[in-house]
Each structure stands twice: as structure tokens, then as C-alpha cells.
Amino acid sequence: MKLVDAHIHLSDAEYTGHLTEVIADAKTAGMSALVTSSVDLKSCQNDVKLAEEYPDLIYPALGIHPWNVNFLKEDELQETIDFILQQSQKRHIVAIGEIGLDYKYETIWEKQMFVFDKMLRLAEQLCLPVVIHSRGTTDKIVDMLQSYNVKRVLLHWFSHPMETLSKAIDLGYFITEGPPVVYSNGIREVVKQTPITNLLPETDGPVIYRKKPFSGQLTKPSYIWAVMEAIAEIKNMPVYDAAEQIAKNFEVFFNVKLR
């Protein structure tokens, strides 16, 4: 059975000193792939190194997270774009991400929009899929994306609104859900309403989950087992069948052949 984590942040500071443990956990759990999402230039560079160190397991999505827009140093946006262009020639990249908009940072809305546009244009240029952060802005982003030539879109940790979910599915977008699918009725409803062909699992590590069975632990790739069991239960499918379809989804979305 091929298991995948479509969204984790392996270069996050909270994983510093724990990466050996996290990679060992992934291997013990039988994980076939981890997509590590970048948030700034430094994490882009580190994620590429990790992908080189662990080929056929770690795949980098490179981009600038909206949380980091206000901390961009002079020329850092262009340096990040240049780095991504350079790495694309080596086929190191599976997506542009994590990029998007966040309503909590309305005071820097214009900066967010400027950086998001640059990242989307880069995805267009490189014909790469995008991994989208859309807290409080999902409806706006789904409307925006239709004016870009971006073919493959992943809405990370989708929660609401449900009418936007229907629109996203009609557009062929993918949805990721993580550990909350085990205990959150809202997230379970999203999974119920999303065709299995549009679903991917994630951990979003190192995000800490406060509810059982994850409470208080360092988020690990092996959490995907619980996520897959919950998805299979909601879809009324054997876990093996659900995992097989989701592995196919992963290969299609990221243009990666799992081993």
C-alpha cells in the first residue's frame, strides 16, 4: 500500500534536531512520498537539499507563504524566483507552494496580492501545480485563479465555505485534509462532499494537534495512517482501495511516479 503526505513543512524550525526521527518514522510507516512545502527562500533552499538527500521519498514544493510576505528582505522575492527557476531546470520541484492569501494579514493585503501574483505567474511559466493557503480567502482565491493559466490546484486544509468547495471540485481542484478528519465533523463533511478522485492526505507538520489520538505529540508522517483510515471510513471503502486511489491522485497532481 502506497501512503503519501501531500503537505508537510520539513524545514520548519520545530523539526530542527528531529529530522532523523521524522524520516525514520516515515520509513517505518511505509510512506512512499512526503511533499515538503516551503515558506521563504531559506526553506526553499533547505527543502531542495532534503529532496537531494532523500530521493524517491521527499519532494519539494517551493514558494513564499503569505505569513512571510511582510518579512521579505530587499530583493528576496526576486532571489526566490531565481532560485526556483534554477531548480526547475534540474527537475527538483513538484509544485509552487505554499502560496496564497490570509485574511489575518489584511494590513499587508497589497503585498500579499503582489507576491501571490508573482508566484502564480511563476507556476504558469513552469507549468507546475500550486499548493494554496487560503485561510478566510478561499472564495476569493478560487475566483481569482480562473484568470490564471494554472491547471492543477491544491487547496490545502480546506474547511469552508461549502459552496466554494463545489465550485473548486467542478474546476478539477484537489483538496487536502489532515489529522482533524479523525475528530472534526466539519472536516469530515468536506471529505464526504469531495470525490475520492480529488482528495489527498496531509499532516501539515509540525502543526500540533491538541485532540486525541494526536494530542501533544510532535506531528509525524505516520499520522497519515489515521487520516487514511478516517477517509476510508467516510467513503465506505476498504483502506487499501482508498489508499490506491489517493496514490494515483498524487501521481497525477504532482507528476511523480511512486515506487
Image: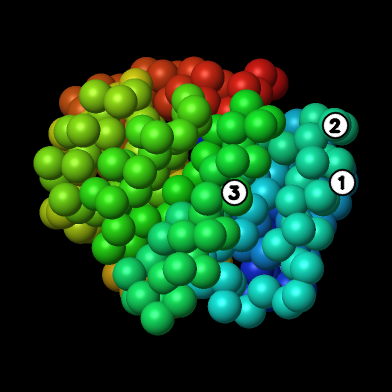
Q: To which residue does mark 2 refer? A: 89
Mark 1 lies on a secondary structure that is: helix
Image spot of residue 129 (x, y percent): 55, 33
Residue at x 49%, y 30% (from the top left corner): 150
Image spot of residue 98 (x, y percent): 55, 53
Q: To which residue does mark 3 refer? A: 119
In the rendered image of this protein, does residue 72 appear above or below residue 247?
below
Amino acid residing under circle 1: Glu
Q: Distance between the residues labelled 2 and 1?
A: 18 Å
Residue 128 visible somewhere in the drawing:
no
Image spot of residue 122 (x, y percent): 64, 41
Mark 2 lies on a secondary structure that is: loop
Q: Nearest the camera: 89 or 206?
A: 89
Q: Distance between the residues labelled 2 and 3?
A: 17 Å
Task: Give the mark nearer the N terminus: 2 vs 3.
Answer: 2
Task: Give the mark nearer the N terminus: 2 vs 1.
Answer: 1
Residue at x 46%, y 55% (from the top left corner): 100
10 Å crowding of disc 3: few (<14), some (14-19), many (20+): many
Numbered disc in front, either 2 or 3:
3
Q: Nearest the camera: 194 or 148?
A: 148
Image spot of residue 108 (x, y percent): 45, 76
In the rendered image of this protein, does residue 175 appear above or below residue 100?
above
Q: To which residue does mark 1 refer? A: 53
Quick one: quadrant of the C terminus?
top right
Count all numbered tags in the image, as a single digit.
Answer: 3
Mark 3 lies on a secondary structure that is: helix
Amino acid residing under circle 2: Gln
Q: How far apart are marks 1 and 3 (CA)?
A: 26 Å
Amino acid residing under circle 3: Met
Residue at x 57%, y 78% (from the top left corner): 70
